[in-house]
Image (spheres, rainbow, N blue to C red):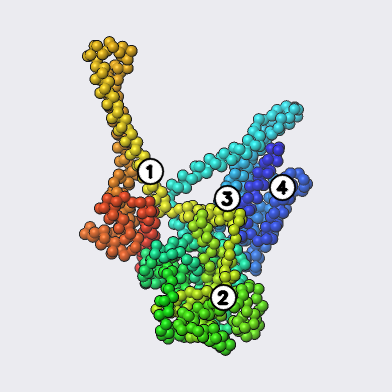
Amino acid sequence: MSFQRYFITASYLLLVIGFAMMVATRHVDQVAMALFSAALLTGLLIDLGVVKWNLTQRAANWLLICYLPLALAEWQLIAISPITIIIHFVLFSTSLKLLRKKTGRDWLWLYVISFCQVLMTAGMMIGTTFFLLLIIYLLAAIATLIGFEIRRSQETFDARRKAAESPQDVVIEYWKSLRHARQKLETPRWRSLSYFSAFSLILILLIAIPIFLAMPRINRNFSRNGMLATEALTGFSDSVRLGEVAQIKLNPQVVMRVRVKFPNGEPPHTLRWRGVTLDYYDGRSWAESGSGPAPLKRIGESYKVEDKRSQYGFTAQRFFLEPLNISTVFVAPRAVLVTGLPELARDQGSGLWTEPHPFHKLEYYVFSDTSVPDYDRLSEDNTRLYSMEIRQRYLQLPANHDRRIDNLAADVTRPANTQIDVVRLIEQHLKNSYSYTLDLQKTEEGDPIADFLFNTRAGHCEYFASAMVMLLRSRRIPARLVNGFQMGEYNKSADVYTVRQSDAHSWVEVYFPKAGWLAFDPTPPSGLSVYEDGIMALIRQYSETLEMFWLENVIGFDTGKQFSMALGFQRWIWKHQKESSFRWFEWFTDLAQKRDVWRADWNPFNGEMLKNRPQSSTLRRTLTHPLTYGLMLLFGLLAAGYLWISHSSSWKKRIRRDASASAVIFYQEMLGILARAGYTREPHLTPSEFSMRMANQHVIRITDLYHGARFGGRKLTDDEIAEVSHSLSEVRKIARARKSLKRRLSKIRK
């Protein structure tokens, strides 16, 4: 490969990767994608000499001026987003540079535009796709810039030769030996440049990793924000037309990832991610008939949804939501506590709502009571005494209610003696007597639920759940429709459930006077998600594992994790220094014992001993000389001074040998954070009294660990260190919220 071909290949590879990163954001439409791809191909053919055509600078300037009104028309008439308009302008101006023979300045301009594309992409996507493309881009950038510098040196050399007006016709080739060349500048071959580029990339990454780990963290929510692609997701508003959920069940796009931890006393079981609850049915669509979501009171960084206890404990969930055009908060049933959201509201159907997040990913924690009462307890819960609100909202039937539904409900539940028997009989009847399909014939007239029950006898989950609600209400049992997602595909490597749009699901919640709302699913097993096995599934799972590692350990590497890593590193250093000190002590002890033996055996005043061992006289005199003892003493003092300085340095003071000192570190850290926010611990307050006055679970937990380590002499485990880091991160959020509130109040007073 000649140098010119190498340079052109590397340059266009750089431009293609920058364009691919823009395409990966899904802000580039198909027309722009096709036109710019054609411009790239044409520009490559021009630079290779295949196409003899050149766009003049004057024509390029006029075309750029003429494009500006078109961009304005896109914004005003077609209502394209400003981000898309900027992308179109960048691609158009780049195309004008591609369609001409390029000077060094043109190449530099193209490189700068490509780098700007990468910067724009960095604000639009934060997944592993961006990281992999960035690695390839860096490799291409290193190779391209090296080639550009060689090309510039070649042009400079040619210019100087011409300026010297040499009578010789000098031909210079850099990449191969020319037999007839008078002069030649030695340069490495293209393979050598490729190896050097790869080595440089590895070196850059090795330098970047410690910088990333040591760099001060910024607000995590801010670092996650960006212009990310919006996923269209229907069926999760306060009004849903029957059949909308089916529109997304054919889409394999990932919606969220969930990590679940069940309490010790509760066996793991299948969960559903609850989204919206709908109670009013008008014969065509479902709606939430309440007065709208009401904001929940914020306690620190958490929101208490329900005030309840569980004999088994609560199931912890950690949600990683993709950018969605909805404000629904997905949780496991009977959520008790939610943390990590900027705002949270709750409607009368126990649905949770937050700010829409179409341009950034969302991460939050949920604690839910997922325990399910057994059959005996539900059999006793049969009083059928409901409040007026329950009867009005959850026994409602549409005006065009088909009476055949009442007759069917009576026939199916004739053997039932209790409410749970009625529910189970209807659920089993729907599962066993109807088939699942997404290919439905539209019903123009009449109730689509009646048409499903008595005519088509086939439908998807939304029809099964709606039919069960109507059948239960016909038997005067309160019920409502729930739209959400199935649990998803479990990824053992990442320990998460991957939930896709195809996992969208509808089910039923039935009200029991004592147990409350419980979930039932009448959809046949054929309507539930089935996940394939094989090599492709394995590759997909490893890809999900990489994605989770990126989200948690790169995007989610906040101050708490940074502190935890530093704490663990300091513990490791202390452990090895202590082992090293013991080894030095053993060496000095052994040396002292040998010295005593040597002095006893080879006393310089014992002439007989010296005569018997003349061959070792030099070694004996050296070892027993006072100067040797002085040097050994000096070396020991230097080693002791080094250890003392290292132990007394500022960063080493944070972790001491004993557990009590390490406890003081993180407790004083917490006090400092709270003091800067205006929460100062008064001298007469004990740590427990101060934590109770703060009334925050993270402050209380840090105080408990402080007591155990400070006064109990117990060293913190790795899990407790991670818990301290997380709690300190939450306390910092409280402090920031306090400072923000103070600033707002001061502005209001002014």
Residue that carries the numbered disc 1 in the rendered image: 572
Q: What element carries label 2?
A: helix
Counting from the top left corner in percent of width and height, residue 358 is at: 54, 65
- Give the mark nearest the N terminus, 2 or 3: 3
Residue that carries the numbered disc 2 in the rendered image: 431
Residue that carries the numbered disc 3 in the rendered image: 132
- Give the mark nearest the N terminus, 4 or 1: 4
Q: Residues within 10 Å of mark 1 (few under 14, many from 20)?
A: few
Seen from the viewer's position, the closer of residues 380 and 683 is 380
611, above or below 476, in the image: above
Calculate the distance from the C-alpha at mark 2 to the C-alpha at mark 3.
Answer: 46 Å
Q: How crowded is mark 2: few (under 14 residues within 10 Å), some or many (20 or more)?
A: some
Mark 4 or mark 1: which is in front?
1
- Give the mark nearest the N terminus, 4 or 3: 4
Seen from the viewer's position, the closer of residues 148 and 574 is 574
Residue 120 shown left or right of residue 8 in the figure: left
Calculate the distance from the C-alpha at mark 4 to the C-alpha at mark 1.
Answer: 55 Å
- Give the mark nearest the N terminus, 2 or 1: 2
- Give the mark nearest the N terminus, 3 or 1: 3
Mark 3 or mark 1: which is in front?
1
Extreme residue in the front direction: 415
Asked if the residue at tag 3 contacts the one at tag 4, i.e. Cβ–Cβ closer than 8 Å, the answer is no
Asked if the residue at tag 1 contacts the one at tag 3, i.e. Cβ–Cβ closer than 8 Å, the answer is no
Residue 382 appears in view: yes
Q: Residue at the location (69% across, 29% down)?
A: 184
Q: How crowded is mark 3: few (under 14 residues within 10 Å), some or many (20 or more)?
A: few
**Quadrant, the C terminus:** bottom left
Residue that carries the numbered disc 4 in the rendered image: 44
Asked if the residue at tag 3 contacts the one at tag 2, i.e. Cβ–Cβ closer than 8 Å, the answer is no
Counting from the top left corner in percent of width and height, residue 220 is at: 45, 57
Q: What element carries label 1?
A: helix
